[in-house]
């Protein structure tokens, strides 16, 4: 088992996670209830309760480079089960945002898929499955991923080769651009979209 050096605690990281999530991580007393209910536990490198402990100990590198923060499904089971009413899923979310800003991707295929999906929605105003797959292959270099399934799926007509673009795609693109801008500026994320970009708000209303 990996040893954690508690002499090197990054207090600024603890404060950043608490500020971004609005939660007091020091309230966690390591009961393990969150981990016991987590449906993604089998995929994690660190359990969610261990992530909480690592945050308390200011272990920024281990938290931000973990695969767990990217593999978390955001189901909020941990939040529901926490006896101290910590929004644990919100803490995981905050870690994901910070990791993305600092360009640390513990599970790169997950972040590549996220980018592929968001780009597909940005181009078309809605998701286009084939386009998302192509972008994912480009972003990961995994060109032959699941290609053998194409002859079975495409003839059924449920995954059209060409995208169906909606009329309001420019407005959708504005929302996604604003989201991406917010990720690079935590103050914008905290302020929320309505307060920092009135023109974009008008465009979608
Ligand atoms: S929100 Fe994430 S960490 Fe919490 S239970 Fe769901 S998958 Fe696990
Ligand atoms: S359920 Fe709450 S108190 Fe218990 S380990 Fe998880 S975060 Fe900590």
Image (tube, rainbow, N blue to C red):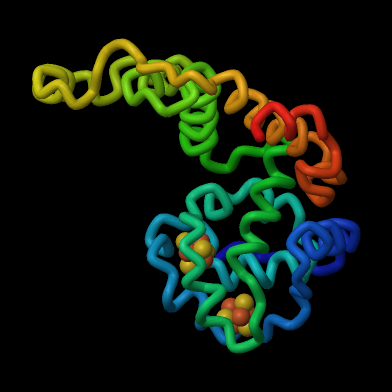
> Image quarter for residue 29?
bottom right
Residue 99 as seen in the image, left or right of residue 33:
right
Image x and y of residue 27, in percent: 74, 83
Q: Quadrant of residue 17?
A: bottom right
Farthest-out residue, top:
162
Is residue 14 found left or right of 30 in the rendered image? right
At horizontal 84% and vertical 49% (from top left) the residue drawn is: 191
**Left or right position of 145 against 11:** left
Q: Please tell me whether residue 161 is drawn above or below residue 71 in the rendered image.
A: above
Q: Position of residue 171 (x, y in %)?
A: 62, 25
Question: What count of labels does the image hold?
Answer: 0
Q: Is residue 3 above or below residue 151?
A: below
In the image, ligand 2 is in what quadrant?
bottom right
Locate residue 113, reporting x and y percent: 46, 32
Identify the residue shown where x is 76% and y is 42%.
Answer: 193
Residue drawn at x 36%, y 17% as measured from the top left: 164
Q: Position of residue 159 (x, y in %)?
A: 23, 23
Does residue 71 sit above or below 33 in this rendering?
Answer: above
């Amino acid at each position: 088992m990996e040893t954690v050096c508690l002499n090197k605690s990054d207090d600024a990281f603890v404060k950043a996670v608490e500020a971004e999530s609005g939660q007091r991580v020091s309230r966690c007393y390591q009961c393990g209830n969150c981990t016991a209910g987590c449906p993604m536990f089998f995929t994690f490198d660190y359990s969610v309760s261990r992530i909480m402990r690592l945050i308390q100990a200011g272990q920024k590198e281990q938290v931000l480079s973990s695969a767990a923060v990217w593999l978390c499904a955001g189901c909020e089971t941990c939040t529901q089960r926490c006896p101290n009413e910590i929004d644990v899923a919100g803490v995981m979310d905050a870690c994901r945002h910070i990791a993305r800003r600092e360009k640390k991707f513990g599970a790169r295929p997950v972040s590549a898929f996220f980018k592929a999906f968001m780009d597909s929605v940005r181009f078309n105003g809605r998701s286009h499955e084939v386009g998302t797959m192509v972008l994912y292959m480009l972003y990961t270099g995994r060109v032959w991923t699941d290609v053998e399934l194409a002859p079975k799926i495409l003839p059924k007509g449920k995954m059209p080769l060409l995208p169906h673009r909606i009329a309001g795609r420019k407005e959708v693109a504005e929302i996604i651009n604003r989201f991406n801008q917010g990720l690079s500026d935590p103050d914008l994320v905290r302020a929320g979209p309505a307060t920092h970009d009135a023109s974009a708000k008008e465009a979608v209303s």
